[in-house]
Amino acid sequence: MDTVVQRRVVQCRVVQCWEAYTPAEHATWNSLYLRMLPLWRQYATPPFLRGLDALQLNPDRIPRLADVNRCLRPLTGFRAQPVAGYLAAPDFFECLRRREFPTTVSIRDASTLDYLPEPDIFHDVAGHVPMHTDPVFADVLARFGECARRVGQTGDKDVAMQALSRFFWFTIEFGLMRSGDSLKAYGSGLLSSHGELEHALESDAVRLLPFDMDQVIAQPFEIDHYQPVLFYVDSFEHLFGLAERFECFLRNCPAPKLISR
């Protein structure tokens, strides 16, 4: 890894001071968890529910990431790496390539249960990490890291990174998957938001489309309102194949063809 990138990633790492969480913060975790649980049972993809069981998260307390990693690492090699907040996109994807998931240690205020513009520990641990227990999904995440390395070799890095960010957004953050005759959520932005999850799968205002790579990387997104367009895949094997196809785009296609400006 480039030493400058490595230095930036290391500097963003923090120690989770679990004893510093207040009773009010644990109560916020509990409120979020109990409110999401019935929606997870109704709308989450089965691997997510199996991941919840495997991680043995305590609904009453913010989890210790060391405990999460003791359950997670033997399953897929991934670990939750505590960070203070956002990482720059290249640093974030480099962590994924190394099977480290940057995990925010702070939790939202009780007055912002419904919406938070940046990630917190509930979004990262309860929304993301259960999926990291699935071996194929974990391989997909690591493949995103490989794609990001390939981005650095393209002619227009900004355009290629924008394409990768949209691909990530409409899969890992807001992805849906076929499950029998219905659609289930596997994206963390859905699985950590009470309102967004129900809206995604119940509202007629949402366009639910089969995943099309060209359409996805040309589709802008915004973070400050419910998503009007979502895409679904057939399986995690399907998603892994899409990540491989994206790498082929980066190797073989001129960058301007990836995305419309």
Image (cartoon, grey):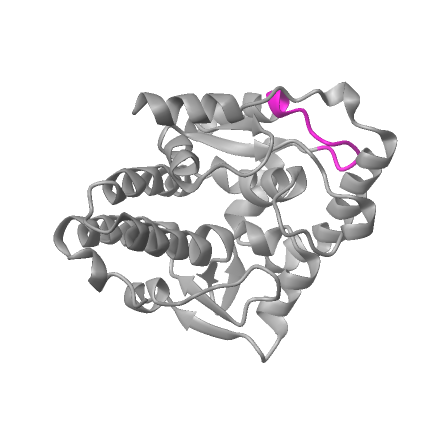
Q: Which range is magenta?
A: 58-67
Whether the magenta-drawn stretch holds residue 65 is answered as yes
Q: Residue at x 59, y 22 (%)?
A: 14
Q: Position of residue 228 (x, y in %)?
A: 53, 72
Q: Position of residue 4 (x, y in %)?
A: 35, 24
Q: Residue at x 69, y 34 (%)?
A: 106
**Residue 74 visible to the viewer:** no
Q: Nearer the viewer, residue 152 or 93?
A: 152
Q: Residue at x 31, y 48 (%)?
A: 240
How would you classify the magenta stretch by its main secondary structure? loop
**Which of the 4 image quarters holds residue 122?**
top right
Q: Residue at x 28, y 66 (%)?
A: 214
Q: Nearer the viewer, residue 98 or 91?
A: 91
Q: Is residue 66 left or right of residue 160?
A: right
Q: Is residue 250 left or right of residue 2?
A: left
Residue 23, placed above or below residue 169? above
Q: Position of residue 164 (x, y in %)?
A: 34, 51
